[in-house]
């Protein structure tokens, strides 16, 4: 995947995952999902 697009896509996915936090998903679950998506999409952006 093209690197800049992977980062933009990952930012959007991360925003959607943050919305799931209000629907009962735990922070740990969402972090695991985000990490797996970042790895599979080859995104290299880092969030703290």
Image (tube, grey):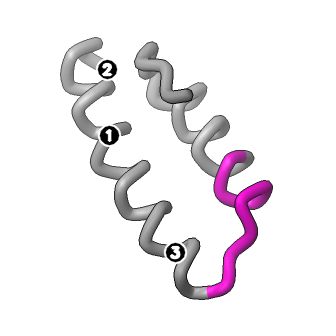
Q: Give the residue at x 75% y 60%.
A: 29
- Which mark is on residue 3? none
> Which tag is nearer the camera, tag 1 or tag 2?
1
Residue 33 on image: x %, y % = 65, 51
Q: Give the residue at x 55% y 40%.
A: 37
User: Alpha-carbon distance for marks 2 and 3?
Assistant: 26 Å
* SS for callout 2: loop
Q: Give the residue at x 28% y 12%.
A: 3
Name the residue tied to disc 1.
11
Horizontal side of 45 relative to 40 (left or right) equals left
Name the residue tied to disc 3.
20
* SS for callout 3: helix
Q: Which residues are magenta?
A: 24-31
Name the residue tied to disc 2.
1
Residue 11 on image: x %, y % = 32, 40
Which sits earlier in the primary sequence, circle 1 or circle 3? 1
Number of on-image labels: 3
Q: Classify 10 Å Cα crowding around label 1: few (below 14), some (14-19), many (20 and above).
A: some
Residue 47 on image: x %, y % = 49, 28
Location of residue 36 with respect to 25 vertically, above or below: above
Which sits earlier in the primary sequence, circle 2 or circle 3? 2
Horizontal side of 12 relative to 29 (left or right) equals left
């Amino acid at each position: 995947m093209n690197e800049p697009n992977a980062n933009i896509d990952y930012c959007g996915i991360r925003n959607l995952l943050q919305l799931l936090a209000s629907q009962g998903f735990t922070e740990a679950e969402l972090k695991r999902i985000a990490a797996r998506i970042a790895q599979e999409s080859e995104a290299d952006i880092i969030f703290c």
